[in-house]
Amino acid sequence: MDNIKVLINEEQIKERILELSKDIRDAYNGESVHIVCILKGGVMFFTELAKALVDLDPTFDFMSCSSYNNNTESSGTVKINKDLDEDIEGKNVLIVEDIIDTGYTLSYVVDMLKTRKPKNIDVCTLLDKPYRREVEVEVRFVGFEIEDRFVVGFGLDNMQKLRSLNYVGYIE
Ligand code: IMP
Ligand code: MG
């Protein structure tokens, strides 16, 4: 793993998650939040963010979808591997994602969840590559905008590997 360069270190991620949790707390104004983790990439960010939001006593749910066919280009088609367990009607839903690239995954998920009549849907992503967008998607909370590199770690994978790194890095 020595050919991986650190892009965002553990301390920077921690600090940013704390800031994001404050923004989220302000946005919901004491109302309850239902946080939806997009598996698998969102899982590390989700657990850290959830801990920082303990005073909102959020409820959790999980969804698994894939748009990458084990390579580094988005296919544009999204497959739902695991749907939510809970009904979201009338809830403040906060989708927690690892990274937004072309936007295909998230726009599909948001459109699908909107049909279930939540009170509100917001998106919180750890990483964003805005200049890569191919479809419009509204993202309310962004951890870091990053340059055009394929990144790994803190949940993000390269062919299912390197998810457990405690930092975000790129392969040299
Ligand atoms: P999109 O549909 O193109 O926005 O792709 C979103 C999904 O692709 C993310 O949830 C990631 O799982 C994956 N992805 C996009 N960029 C990267 C990257 O740089 N590293 C690892 N996974 C990525
Ligand atoms: Mg993802």
Image (cartoon, grey):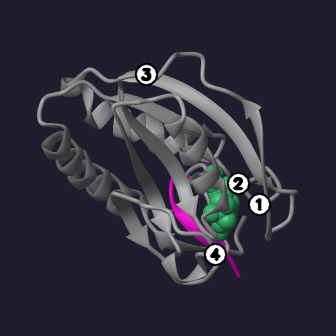
Circle 3 sits in a helix, a strand or a loop, which is it? Answer: loop
- The structure residue drawn at horizontal position 46% and vertical position 42%, both measured from the top left corner, is 95
- The structure residue drawn at horizontal position 54% and vertical position 35%, both measured from the top left corner, is 115
Where 106 falls versus 130 (above or below)? above
In the displayed structure, does residue 140 sit left or right of residue 3? left
Where 82 falls versus 14 (above or below)? above
The kind of residue tagged 2 is Leu
Marks 3 and 1, Cα distance to the nearest angstrom? 35 Å
**What number is the disc on residue 89?**
3
Q: Position of residue 12 (x, y in %)?
A: 34, 63
Query: Disc 1 marks which residue?
Result: 158
Query: Disc 4 marks which residue?
Result: 134
- The structure residue drawn at horizontal position 63% and vertical position 80%, both measured from the top left corner, is 149
Where 171 falls versus 22 (above or below)? below
Q: Is mark 4 within 8 Å of ligand 1?
A: yes
Query: How would you rate the neighbour count of disc 4 (Cα within 10 Å): few for under 14, some for 14-19, many for 20 or more?
Result: few
Contact, CB < 8 Å: mark 2 with mark 1?
A: yes
Q: Quadrant of residue 33?
A: top left
Question: Which part of the image, by quadrant, shows the C terminus?
Answer: bottom right
Marks 2 and 1, Cα distance to the nearest angstrom? 7 Å
Query: Disc 2 marks which residue?
Result: 162
Contact, CB < 8 Å: mark 2 with mark 3?
A: no
